[in-house]
Amino acid sequence: MAFYAMAFMGMTPFGSLLAGSFGGMIGVRDTVMAGGILCIIGALLFAKDIHAAKKMIPAFKKEMTPEIETGIESSEEITDSL
């Protein structure tokens, strides 16, 4: 049962314990603010590397089935229109 829960919930229980510990030490408001700042930093790091990931897509397309390739092409069209 523990493996099943870990497969679907991931590291959420450990993050909750960590957030609770920080909440007790530095306060709830500062803990939530620190979590938000970390999420923004993570999003910025991801956004910085997204162009490198897009360059790798053509190499993966050669190994995919036509259905998957069609889905990727349609998602690229949507992303390019934004």
Image: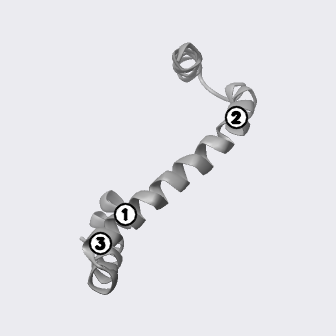
Reading the image, the residue beneath label 3 is 16
- As rendered, which of 17 and 23 lies closer to the eye? 23
Q: Which mark is residue 33?
A: 1
| Image position, residue 11 (x, y; %) | 38, 67
- Please name the amino acid that badge 2 sits on: His
In this rendering, would 41 be left or right of 32?
right
Number of marks: 3
The residue that appears at 27% across and 65% down in the rendered structure is: 5
Which secondary structure, mark 3? Answer: helix
Question: Which residue is label 2 attached to?
Answer: 51
Q: Residue furthest bottom?
A: 25
Looking at the rendered structure, the kind of residue marked 3 is: Ser
Say if 58 sits above or below 40 in the image: above
**Of helix, strand and loop, which one carries label 1?**
helix
Query: What scheme was used to colour the molecule?
Result: one colour
On screen, residue 79 above or below 56: above
Q: Amino acid at mark 1?
A: Met
Along the viewing direction, whichever of 77 and 34 lies nearer the viewer: 34
Mark 1 is surrounded, within 10 Å at the Cα level, by few (under 14), some (14 to 19) or many (20 or more) other residues, namely few
Q: Which of label 2 and label 1 is nearer to you? A: 1
What element does badge 2 sit on? helix
- Write the residue at 32% across / 74% down: 19
Task: Tell me the number on the disc at residue 71.
Answer: none
Q: Residue at x 32, y 65 (%)?
A: 32
Residue 40: x %, y % from top left = 49, 52
Question: Is 66 displayed left or right of 28 in the figure?
Answer: right
- The reply to whether callout 2 and callout 1 are in contact (CB within 8 Å) is no
Mark 1 or 3, closer to the camera: 1
Do tag 2 and tag 3 residues touch (Cβ < 8 Å)?
Answer: no
